[in-house]
Image (tube, rainbow, N blue to C red):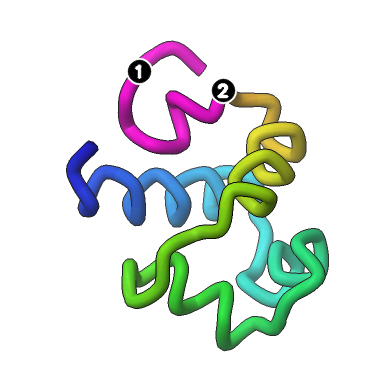
Amino acid sequence: MAEMDYVRILRDLREDADKTQTQIAEVLGTSQTMYARYERGANELPIHHLITLSRYYGVSTDYLLGLSRER
């Protein structure tokens, strides 16, 4: 997985859903600041957040990680 793919996918999914970082942070039960760090690649996304986002966006974890083009 290329880190840039991972952070680009996080941002693109959020923007495509017309959501703010604050709204996604609330879904994850974290702060906007921490979510922004995930989206920038400054912090790794915990597995439980990966699973939550996969369910929220209706995509596979492989897609979120940039390992598959299939959603």
In the image, what residue occupies the spot 65% across and 69% down?
A: 20
| Earlier residue among tags 2 and 1 | 2
> Is residue 9 magenta-colored?
no
In the depicted structure, whether residue 49 falls above or below residue 20: above
* Label 2–label 1 contact, CB within 8 A: yes
- Residue type marked 1: Ser
In the picture of the structure, the residue carrying the numbered disc 1 is 68
Instruction: Label the magenta part by its dominant secondary structure.
Output: loop
Q: Which residues are magenta?
A: 60-71
In this picture, is 69 found above or below 58? above
Which quadrant would residue 35 be assigned to in this image? bottom right
Relative vertical location of residue 65 with respect to residue 31 in this rendering, above or below: above
**Most foreground residue, 44 or 18:** 44
Which residue type does callout 2 highlight?
A: Ser
Q: Position of residue 68 (x, y in %)?
A: 35, 18
Q: Which residue is mark 2?
A: 60
Residue 8 place in picture, x, y as percent: 33, 51
Q: Residue at x 60, y 25 (%)?
A: 59
Residue drawn at the location 23% of the way across and 37% of the way down = 1
Task: Say which residue appears at 34% left-offset and 47% top-offset.
Answer: 6
